[in-house]
Image: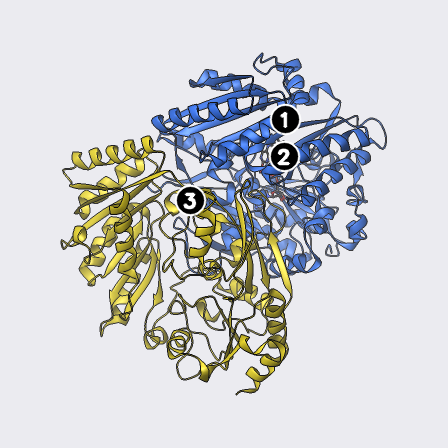
Chain colours: A blue, B yellow
Amino acid sequence: MVAATAGIDWRAIAQDFAQIVGDRHVVQRREELLVYECDGLTSYRQRPALVVLPRTTEEVAQIIKVCDRHHIPFVARGSGTGLSGGALPLQDSVLIVTARMNQILDLDLENQRVVVQPGVINNWVTQAVSGGGFFYAPDPSSQIICSIGGNVAENSGGVHCLKYGVTTNHVLGLKIVLPTGNIIDTGSKIPDMPGYDLTGLFVGSEGTLGIATEITLRIVKAPEAIHVLLADFTTVEASGQTVSDVISAGVLPAGMEIMDNFSINAVENVVTTACYPRDAAAILLIELDGLETEVAANSQRVEAICRQNGARSIRTAIDLQERLTLWKGRKAAFAAVGQISPDYYVQDGVIPRTQLPYVLREIEALSQQHGYRVANVFHAGDGNLHPLILYDNAVPGELEKVEDLGGDILKLCVAVGGSISGEHGIGADKRCYMPAMFSETDMDTMQLVRQVFDPQRIANPDKLFPTPRTCGEAARARAQQHFSDVERY
Amino acid sequence: MSAIATTLQSMLDSTAVHPWADLPSALQASIAQAIMPDASPDCVVYPSTVEHLAEVMTRAHGEGWRVLPCGYGSKLSWGGLAQDVQVVLSTQRLNRVLDHAVGDMTVTAEAGMPLAVLQQTLARQGQWLPLNPFYGDRTSLGGMVATGDAGSLRQRYGTVRDLLIGLSLVRADGQVAKAGGRVVKNVAGYDLMKLLTGSWGTLGLLTQLTFRTYPLPETSRTVVVTGSAEAIALLGQALLASSLTPTDAEWVVAPGLDWSATPAQISLVCRFQSIAVSVETQADQLSQMAAALSLPCQIYRDDAEATLWRAIAQQWDNEAPALTCKFGVLPVRAAQVLDKMQAMVSIDVAAINAGSGVGHLQVPITDDAAQCITHLRQLCNAQGGFLTLLRAPAALKQQVDVWGYTGNAIALMHGIKHQFDPQNLLSPGRFLHGV
Ligand SMILES: Cc1cc2nc3c(=O)[nH]c(=O)nc-3n(C[C@H](O)[C@H](O)[C@H](O)COP(=O)(O)OP(=O)(O)OC[C@H]3O[C@@H](n4cnc5c(N)ncnc54)[C@H](O)[C@@H]3O)c2cc1C
């Protein structure tokens, strides 16, 4: 439940905030608030009452203390690229934006650790350490704009997470301002500190347990060699089987990505890579990295496995330019789909890898049944699907139908033993699907944690878990009921 | 027989409840290591289904019985002492593999499954769970998770927290809950896997665990280089700065082993596991790096390698009373810290993982053990780290702080414990600051 906010004197609150961060860093004019009314999931919009941009942990703590005192909900926001409405403001809420908290506080190459403020952009970390031969492994496609704070909150993945793991595997410590305004430190540069693993608990908590104001990251030695293989197949099944065979053969690529025929053509229409054959049912991109000798040997094995599975052609890229060429189409996939359709809706579900052929057939059937085209692009190595549903938002009622299709795809993922989110989070978008995966008791157990961190329920309330108010009867939950009080576009 | 044991026998079959007096003395002694002296529990219970386990816990919750969860008891001697325990709840009979999804490389098993048996099952399909905790021949999955004891393969594979992707647990009120799932990538809901890993049985009884598995590596080589702390530290830094990818890399002091027997010397033990061409190249490169520092280097393969690792594990695993600690220091200081420890105490065996700075130390019990712990802890704390007592005589555990937590989140940890277990029934007093 959202804390009661009736009768808040926003002018007085704004003054309190101005004393903490200075006038310039409190946004209250309607037109300036506009940019903050949605995140990457633009179909939900809500203007916050106030936006405040702190620079230090202490400022964040003071702001939250004001919220705590007045029972005002607050929502943290990094770069606002989230795709599940995590940073979507609530009515009568304060949006705390970390954009000014953008300092790298400690570059400790000797110990392979970096300490950053939450507003630091993901790929600044790699840029800062690459001179020393390191990189920061979690690399969401949004890495040039998304913030580390947002990555921590969503436990973001990336193309290389098959081998290197996701955000949680790389976060060793946090400074957290709790929803009470108290500050705690969890973990450190050294893992396994005694006590509960609060760092691990916080990562992926989607801004509901407080605001991370310092983040200690592990960095990784850059590999000696990288090979990228591109194979194309006449059936999607064959590409899926190749992925399974590669992994069973004991090769762990940095990443494996599949695009289906529809995505291939979308990409070729728009960016004309001339690498992806238009008549292929699927293309498979495999990136291998590591020691020179190992990569060379594995590259040959993978090529053989592709051939055994009927790959029509295989291209291997070793130097940087060539590798980028092969990746170009995959990287442009979302944008390309954006150009062939007025709008698209990105779904994020996970399935056990071996279910890939079945699930893709079912998605095709659902697509026909609902009457919307679906382009499939996915992190195949870990079974993380990103079906892109094409539609036209200008047609009234379309979004609801598309969300229904998206919901059916999620249920399909759960039915085969998967998950309703691999990396984009639950946020506002998917909380009504939580009961598809978790029982009341499961969710109550998770809520025990929230109760400790946020007894007043002011930290991004109404996100992540379904409530009777937002989802009605869980079984009949429909995405479009989530934010009945929110304007829709 | 006590009223508690009688009640439990009426609920479960009689073979599932063992009154304290009927227990073999070895088991009594093992349990005694986990609880405050001068009090013994009523009975040990071995439910064979999750339903039974939940029923027992529900009853305990209703009656206010305090419960000590355990698996095979291999690590009961570790950690703090539980208070006023009435029921010891063992998961030993919850020991099935529920689902080995071979193609998906995940495995779900009950918490009482012995790790060693799971490894055999996985190996038949060419897979493994790349964890090598202490006493790996007799540790249950649940015990490994509850103590967060991962082992040295963390250099490549991370720890329990990185491999555990889903779980079910019985809460203090007897309700069964789950979190995570059976897929390797999943961000739905809070990550209770992380919370439960290393929670020492204070938050719930783990019943089912799902892990990510890996293909068994084709070949393996272990390189051992021994020298002065300074030289070995340099070698370690060179290794970490190189593009070599050891699965295991540790600084080791183990006077009981030939190669490590020279006083004031430290060894770097480094294992490479991959395809043949890779492990050979890597072992060669490391020996060249050692040669450049004029350090002698030995490469182990096949049987010799297996023997080497067994010998190292045996150094830790002996019946003789000893003080075993887990500690952490900044990785770059590790060799130096080992050197200092050698000067402070007579080390039975010690090892620090190169990448993480997390280590273990075993020393004989001396009259000034309490003081030793204080000094060792000061040494670790000064390097930004910590030192926790794992195995030690009960008297010593009552005398010194077992955990050595120096942070500022105790209130929050108490809050979590209180939410999950308001009556403080689960492993009461075993975790830090009475959590
Ligand atoms: C084109 C595009 C590609 C993408 N590709 C990927 C991808 O490959 N993999 C992937 O995982 N995601 C991807 N995303 C999703 C998104 O970029 C990630 O979720 C990212 O981590 C969000 O970061 P942000 O800074 O934009 O966070 P925001 O959107 O601002 O916030 C996200 C959530 O984090 C919370 N939050 C923000 N900062 C903090 C903090 N300091 N403390 C606590 N909570 C905080 C917010 O309250 C919100 O709940 C993509 C998005 C786009 C638009």
- What is the x, y in percent for residue A408? 75, 39
**Discs 2, 1 touching: Cβ within 8 Å:** yes
Q: Residue furthest right?
A: A396
Nearest the viewer among B249 and A364 is A364
Q: Is residue B125 left or right of residue B347?
A: right
Q: Are marks 2 and 1 on the same chain?
A: yes
Determine whether the residue tagged by mark 3 lies in a helix, strand or loop. helix
Judged by depth in the image, the label closer to the viewer, 3 or 2, is 2
- What is the x, y in percent for residue B18? 50, 79
The amino acid type, in three-letter code, at marker 3 is Tyr
Q: Is residue B54 above or below residue A472?
A: below
The amino acid type, in three-letter code, at marker 1 is Val
Q: Chain of mark 1?
A: A
Determine whether the residue tagged by mark 1 lies in a helix, strand or loop. helix
Q: Is residue B156 left or right of residue A489?
A: left
Quadrant of the picture in which ligand 1 is shown: top right
Report the label total.
3
Q: Which mark is residue A356?
A: 2
Q: Which residue is mark 1?
A: A236
The amino acid type, in three-letter code, at marker 2 is Leu
Residue under the image location 14 percent in, 38 percent down: B294
Q: Which mark is residue B157?
A: 3
